[in-house]
Amino acid sequence: MTEAKKELEKVKKEIIVTGNEKPQVGVYVCHCGVNIGGVVSVPDLVEYAATLPDVAVAREYKFFCSDTGQNIIKEDIQSGLINRVVVAACSPRMHEPTFRLVCKEAGLNQFLFEQANIREHSTWVHMKDPEGAYEAAKDLIKMSVAKARELKPLEVKTVSIEPACLIIGGGIAGMNSALDLATEGYKVYLVEKTPTIGGHMAQLDKTFPTMDCSACILTPRMVDVARNENIELLTYSEVVEVTGYVGNFEATIMKKPHYVDQEACTGCGVCVDYCPVVIGNEFDLDLATRKAIYIPFPQAVPGKYTIDMDHCIKCGICAREDVCEPDAIRYDEEPEYIKVKVGTIIIATGWDLYDPTELKQYGYGRYPNVIDGLQMERLLSSTGPLDGKPARPSDLKAPHSIAFLQCVGSRNFREGGNKYCSRVCCMYATKQARQYKEKHPDADVYIFYMDVRAFGKGYEEFYESATKNYGINYIRGRVAEVREGEDHSIIIRAEDTLLQEPMELKVDMFVLSCGLESRSDAGEVASLVRVQRSADGFFMEAHPKLRPVDTLTEGIFIAGVAQGPKDIPDSVAQAKGAASSAATLMAKGEVEMEPFFAVVRPDRCIGCGMCVENCAYGAIELIDDTRFGKIASINQALCKGCGACSGNCRCSAIDIFGFTGEQIFSIIMEGEL
Amino acid sequence: MSKVEMQSEKSEKKKEWEPKIIAFLCNWCSYAGADLAGVSRIQYPSNIRIVRVPCSGRINPYFIIKSLLRGWDGVVVSGCHPGDCHYVSGNLVARRRFAILQDLLNLFGIEPDRVTFMWSSASEGDRFANLIKKVTKNIKRLGPNKKFESTW
């Protein structure tokens, strides 16, 4: 194969195509294994394609995306047989870049390529109707050839990239991305909504399967982030607007008022002793209290105080000279808006815990001794409200028996339920059960499960040990309902599906292993940066296997649970992947943009200004032309090629490169009849 | 001639008639959604022919009229959901334009149901398939588009 490559290199020459000569289209119909070839007859499609006007050659191959397949196309270009390429295969969203490169390498302008999507749009969706699929594939090829005939060579536009990254979310994923990029020398703006970085991981006690303490591995990283001179840490801040495009995004960030001067505050904490307002502490999931002036937890970074204005009664005590010696209290502080220019964006906004209140049969919110998994974590935590001596909420006595229920808010195919597996609950319940048994070996611990999914490195061994060495009882079956017995005990009615008999169990405490959900404000973030979300609400990757950290919007990446439920090792791995992808893009210094922008035909334009009104980017203005009078003029640096101007032009005076009126008309006229 | 008469006359002429529908899908939401339907192997009627465009805002009403003149039995334009447009507001511009077009079609004597404007996101493969099923059913009910046969 290298021989063949060398041979190609030798004969490689630039094929000059002006767009005025007679089009000679090469049609390449791919079998894609059995994906296409197994549904429709590829030889028949090739035979059909060869009859289409201006088609110089039509060929078939098992996989045109393979090296051999690519060379078939290259050879036809090199031999001067064709000057337009149509590949009938998968979606252009999959392999358009591959085949454009083929053209480029063979010396043909890469925009003289068109892809007919006969896999996703025909053979896969009409598998049970092969005749219909064949007709659809024929038409799609015909329409692509029609467009190919009208293709003109285009020059790629390169724009410089700002060597800076905006990371939204300061949990374990966002922090790892930030540290990697900062170490590589890029400027990082790490925006965190809450007053501290650390995210949900800061709430955890120990982490499975190694049982290392979460704080011991997390807090040093938090300090690293705060100390790194390339990272500008923007806590208690929110991104409110993002404009621009890959390489040149501009983000507006709102720094919410702390009502405490962050420079002046020394974090001494005297104000907390004096603050008269006592409310539930969200960090401890309301299992403990905090004051209206607070830091979320003692190891928070930055360790400066914030006043919760929703609860502050403005009594003025904290502002007293004898209370706040550094004189840091600012009741009249206003939000501050800053603008930053970045080349890339990483979304690492994390997750919300599923709220089990609506599952009334489990009594959450009704019975004090029914708690969720994250509350259990706080009860077990040595930095938690009970200093690591877990007790049940009703009487603060250590429970003699605990039951866990798995898949709460996950794997639910009923209307409105989360269909996905949350991937962490089996392991965190097992971990919590083991931790409790370590503290109280005599306690009875039960786990009601559907399946135990112990898939990660060391997980199966961890689970095995929980049953063998710790005597944790795993009961396969769903809990039907629970009710409260005497002394706030919980009586569980369930079915043991292995023994196939109903059962009733009385325990002192009942823990719901709730799943992970996309954040309640994920929709707002998606609109802000214009990325897609999957049906489950998490951010959508560009390709589930090959581009798992990219989004469909170039220059924007996703990391951690924002993309879908995952445990800490996977979140960190993905965060590093996202950082690496962002760095790969920025390291080049410039990015190639598709030259699909609007162009004005001055002889047609009447200067009505409709396009100016419709342009979302302010890329069009009316100018006075010496020959044509008042006409529209496009600033190509601002134009994104959406075509809103062209769609509205009553004179058809604006065209969009890559999707010209002629090309679309050609498709319309050829496709039918 | 009323719609019903036209329909019955045409269905007598040709029993095996299958409509052909041209669908302009925006690259970022609907085209990706159609791809997802493919990847998920969701089956829908094979009457649709998909054309990729950058944004629903790109679609000049002229393209739709031209399609109908050419004899396509139906036209679909699909974009991102309102508020989710990759290009900020292209889909909203398109929505306004097509509201007016519907009135114009009526004036031409073309059944407005031949032209469908819809939203479907990149994650809504099943929604896309369902909408296509519905559109195909609608066009089948209307029968072949022979209004401009003489101009072909």
Image: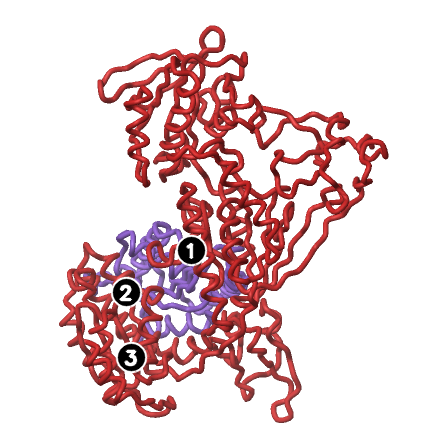
Q: Name the outermost residue toward the right.
A: A321
Residue plotted at (21% across, 62% down): A133
Residue plotted at (21% across, 72% down): A29
Amino acid type of the residue tagged 3 in the rendering: Val
Circle 2 residue: A90
Residue A577 is labelled as 1
Amino acid type of the residue tagged 1 in the rendering: Gly
Residue A85 is labelled as 3
Query: Considering depth in this image, is B43 or A515 the residue closer to the camera?
Result: A515
Amino acid type of the residue tagged 2 in the rendering: Cys
Q: Where's the N terminus of chain A, which quadrant?
A: bottom left
Q: Label 2's element? A: loop
Q: Are marks 1 and 2 on the same chain?
A: yes
Its colouring scheme is by chain
Q: Which chain is purple?
A: B
What chain letter is assigned to the residue under label 3?
A
The quadrant in which residue A80 appears is bottom left
What chain letter is assigned to the residue under label 2?
A
Compute the Cα span from label 1 to label 2. Answer: 26 Å
Q: Are marks 1 and 2 in contact (CB under 8 Å)?
A: no
Q: Is residue A165 left or right of residue A362?
A: right
Compute the Cα span from label 3 to label 1. Answer: 34 Å
Q: Are marks 2 and 3 in contact (CB under 8 Å)?
A: no
Image x and y of residue A436, in percent: 42, 21
Give the mark nearer the N terminus: 1 vs 2: 2
Compute the Cα span from label 2 to label 3. Answer: 15 Å
